[in-house]
């Protein structure tokens, strides 16, 4: 067995020991920013459960940011007609979302008495006010100008980024523009739609997906585009379902800290479907 305590012995065996001395902080910390993350934000109470609630909320925020980055990358490649690279970014985002959804298990322990131990300290803070989540919804094609309002005074250029995402084409707009440039029949009304409104299902786009799936096999890149978008829509629904179940476990049907009716409001807002024709077209295949 290699000794951990004797670096000279490991070197003599031809196994280099990791470097232990650095002039400043470690290059790892300089790259990852772990010393900043470690003291990023303190809890509001001494309740031991609150730390998990805070850190896992931050972890999810980071996942939201990463997924938005991947989707903007995919949009850029689609605009350059580079489907292969767009697919790489979309698949990374799908797998990131699978990992994000797995983090919901960390909330299972939380019963209403556990949540009540620190809930009051949250004041009016609610995930509803997450601008990174809203950014994702805008990229998915769910647009509502009223939902920009809470973020007007958020620090940095976050509000400007959110407004830009609200006004710009969503991911699906870029997918349909790509398909239209590659000999698929996308109605003009869809290509020229007002991108500050939510994407609405269109019969012509449904026809397009039916024809594309019936004409192609599983290895066809455009069919794979349809499938990875379907995976993403499914991951998004799964996130919302996990959230709903976690809310039900931790606070039942009480009103939310963000001022909504809580469970009932979340159930209603869950009914929206990303990339709707990729689902409706399946009935006709
Ligand atoms: C068990 C813990 C949680 C509870 C009890 C809870 C509760 C709620 C409630 C009641 C709402 C409705 C809005 C309102 O507050 O009135 C809401 C919305 C929301 N929460 Fe949570 N939440 C939890 C964990 C999280 C986490 C970890 C995140 C991730 C950052 C999150 C993100 C969101 C988002 C994005 C919305 C808005 C959804 C939409 O607009 O459709 N929540 N939450």
Image: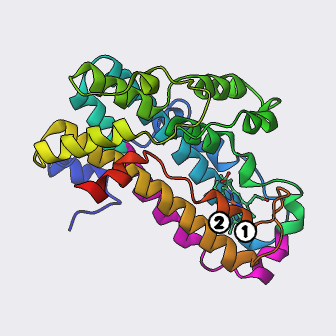
Q: Residues within 10 Å of mark 1 (few under 14, many from 20)?
A: few
**Left or right of residue 100, residue 186 in this image:** left
* Mark 1 and mark 2: Cα distance apart in space: 5 Å
Q: Is residue 28 above or below residue 282?
A: above
Residue sitting at x 46%, y 38%? 28
The colour scheme used here is: rainbow
In the image, is the residue at mark 2 within 8 Å of ligand 1 by its beta carbon? no
Task: Identify which residue, 176 or 147, lies in the foreground.
Answer: 176
Q: What residue is pinned by disc 2?
A: 267
**Residue to which mark 1 is pinned:** 264
Q: Residue 148 in the image: x percent, y percent?
A: 74, 34
212 is higher (above) or lower (below) than 10: above
Residue 46 visible from this viewpoint:
no
Q: Are marks 1 and 2 in contact (CB under 8 Å)?
A: yes
- Would you identify the image quadrant in which residue 147 lies? top right
- Please tell me which residue is depicted at 40% across the width and 26% down the height of the picture: 174
Whether residue 1 can be seen here: yes
Which x, y percent locates residue 19?
37, 41
């Amino acid at each position: 067995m290699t000794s951990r305590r004797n670096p000279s012995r490991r070197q003599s065996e031809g196994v280099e020991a990791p470097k232990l001395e650095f002039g400043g902080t470690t290059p790892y910390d300089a790259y990852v920013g772990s010393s900043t993350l470690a003291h990023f934000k303190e809890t509001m109470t001494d309740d031991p459960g609150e730390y998990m609630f805070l850190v896992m909320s931050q972890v999810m925020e980071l996942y939201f940011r990463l997924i938005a980055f991947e989707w903007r990358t995919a949009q850029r490649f689609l605009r350059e007609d580079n489907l292969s690279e767009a697919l790489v970014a979309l698949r990374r985002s799908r797998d990131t979302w699978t990992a994000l959804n797995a983090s919901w298990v960390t909330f299972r322990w939380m019963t209403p008495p556990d949540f009540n131990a620190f809930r009051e300290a949250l004041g009016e803070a609610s995930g509803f006010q997450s601008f990174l989540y809203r950014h994702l919804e805008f990229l998915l094609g769910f647009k509502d100008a009223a939902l920009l309002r809470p973020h007007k005074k958020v620090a940095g250029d976050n509000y400007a980024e959110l407004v830009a995402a609200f006004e710009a084409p969503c991911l699906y707009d870029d997918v349909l523009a790509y398909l239209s440039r590659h000999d698929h029949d996308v109605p003009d009304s869809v290509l020229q739609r007002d991108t500050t409104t939510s994407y609405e299902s269109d019969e012509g786009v449904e026809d397009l997906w039916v024809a594309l799936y019936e004409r192609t096999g599983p290895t066809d890149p455009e069919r794979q585009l349809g499938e990875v978008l379907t995976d993403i829509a499914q991951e998004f629904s799964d996130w919302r379902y996990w959230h709903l179940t976690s809310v039900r476990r931790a606070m039942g049907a009480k009103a939310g800290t963000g001022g909504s009716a809580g469970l009932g409001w979340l159930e209603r807002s869950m009914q929206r479907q990303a990339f709707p024709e990729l689902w409706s077209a399946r009935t006709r295949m």
